[in-house]
Amino acid sequence: MSLALPAASLAAQDFEGAITVRIASTAGNGAPAPDLEYLARGGKVRVNVRSPMGSVALIAVPSEKKLYTLMDAQSMYMEQPLSFDARGGAAATSPPPTITRTGKKETIAGHECEHILVSGQQGNTDVCMARGLGPFFAATAAFGASMPAWQRALVADGAFPLKVSRADGTTQLEVTKIERKKLSDALFTVPGNYTKMDMPPGRRP
């Protein structure tokens, strides 16, 4: 079953606000990984990430086909080309996953989502995907990592994952808060006092 939608539908989402995402992983010091904050406005997406080296923000601007990485502690930024049709990096060339709708629905953080089963080379994954929350941007793809099958399915479908579970029932990702609110356009632009950092050809940050 194909869930593919035109790429333009990603930018057509009218959600504006913040989404808090909890990731089931650990930081380098063994502590739980900090929550991610997704901000969406007018088709643009900003992902705020906290790290021991300071806060980092990824800004995806589909209209410009650009991805900006802001490093606040250094007042610097990097610029990379962005294609919403090829955000999976190396994973984009692998066979598409098999999608099975279960018909099961759940309400997470006050928003309804539908459970689907995604079967791909990485195994089976249960994803409760929601509509109307703007485009989902896989932050790991910005750093050259392969995109799992469930992420590729969501990118193609223009949906946002509220909960992702492995076949053994362990939760990989879960949204804990959805807040609709007005956001400043400045959050989705590079500050004027930031210095551009050029990356060598073929290198990722």
Image (cartoon, rainbow, N blue to C red):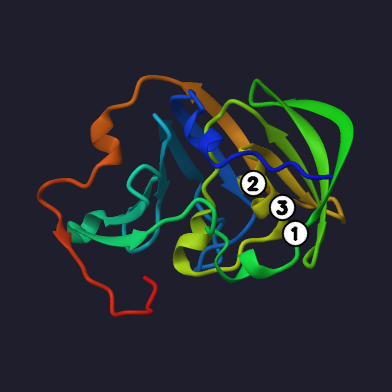
**Which residue is nearer to you in this view: 91 or 111?**
91
Point out residue 120 in the picture as x, y percentages from the top left corner.
80, 61
Q: Is residue 73 left or right of residue 4?
A: left
Point out residue 167 in the picture as x, y percentages from the top left corner.
86, 55
Question: What kind of element bears circle 1?
Answer: loop
Q: Quadrant of the N terminus?
A: top right
Point out residue 28 in the picture as x, y percentages from the top left corner.
50, 69
Residue on which disc 3 sits: 150
* Amino acid type of the residue that numbered disc 3 sits on in the rendered structure: Trp
Tell me: residue 73, above or below residue 18. Answer: below
Q: Is residue 114 left or right of residue 45?
A: right
Residue at the extreme left: 193
* Amino acid type of the residue that numbered disc 2 sits on in the rendered structure: Ala
Q: Which mark is residue 96?
A: 1
Q: Quadrant of residue 22?
A: top right
Tell me: residue 106, above or below residue 63. Answer: above
Mark 1 and mark 3 lie on one chain; the one further toward the N terminus is: 1
Nearer the observer: mark 3 or 2; the answer is: 2
Give the distance between the C-alpha atoms of the residues marked 2 and 1, in whole angstroms.
Answer: 10 Å
Question: What kind of element bears circle 2?
Answer: helix
Verify CB contact (< 8 Å) between mark 3 and mark 2: no
Crowd band around label 1 with a 10 angstrom C-alpha radius: few (<14), some (14–19), many (20+): some
Q: How many marks?
A: 3
Question: What kind of element bears circle 3?
Answer: helix
* Amino acid type of the residue that numbered disc 1 sits on in the rendered structure: Pro
Mark 3 and mark 2 lie on one chain; the one further toward the N terminus is: 3
Q: Which mark is residue 156?
A: 2
Point out residue 200 in the picture as x, y percentages from the top left corner.
28, 80
